Image: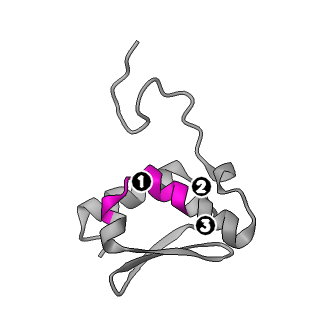
Amino acid sequence: MLNTDKKLYEKMVAIWSITKMPMLNGEIVSGEVRFSWAKGPIVNLTMELFEKLEPLEIVQHLEKKMDEKYGINGKRFRSDFSGYFTHPFSSQRTN
């Protein structure tokens, strides 16, 4: 489904761009997106909630659940966007 649904694909690419959690995976099963990483499952989101949330909100939710389940601060896996002048997913620069 990830290959055939452009919106879903783009959202997952955005999530993978924001965080570098080791082996982060999002699998669609029975109307849910099941997120897991190298150490195991993180959280299941309904498709409705997944579609409603922005990629950054999903990453923040993953980080919170990672801290609760594994005692690991997921923010340490965040990508560094400090070199961007504006929105990190925008190609437009403002000076």
| Residue 60 colored in magenta in the image | yes
Report helix, strand or loop for mark 3. helix
Nearest the eye: 73 or 90 = 73
- The answer to which image quadrant residue 72 occupies is bottom right
- What separation in Å lies between label 1 and label 3 (alpha carbons)? 15 Å
Q: Position of residue 47 (x, y in %)?
A: 33, 73
Mark 1–mark 3 CB contact (< 8 Å):
no
Q: Is residue 55 left or right of residue 22?
A: left
| Kind of residue indicated by mark 1 | Pro
Question: Quarter holding the C terminus?
Answer: top left
Residue drawn 51% across and 71% down?
25
Disc 3 designates what residue? 65
Q: Which residue is situated farthest in the bottom direction here?
A: 30
Q: Which amino acid lies under the numbered mark 3 shown in the image of this protein? A: Lys
N-term mark: 2 or 1: 2
* Residue at the image position 33 percent from the left and 26 percent from the top: 92
Q: Which residues are magenta?
A: 51-61
Q: Which residue is mark 1?
A: 55
The residue tagged 2 is: 20
Q: CA distance from mark 2 to mark 1?
A: 13 Å
Residue type, numbered disc 2: Lys
**Mark earlier in primary sequence (1, 3):** 1
Specify the quadrant that holds the N terminus. Answer: bottom left
Which SS class for mark 1?
helix
In the picture, the disc for residue 32 is none
Q: Kindly report the secondary structure that dominates the magenta region of the rendered protein.
A: helix
Residue drawn at the location 41% of the way across and 56% of the way down:
13
Mark 3 or mark 2, earlier in chain: 2
In the image, 73 versus 82, the foreground residue is 73
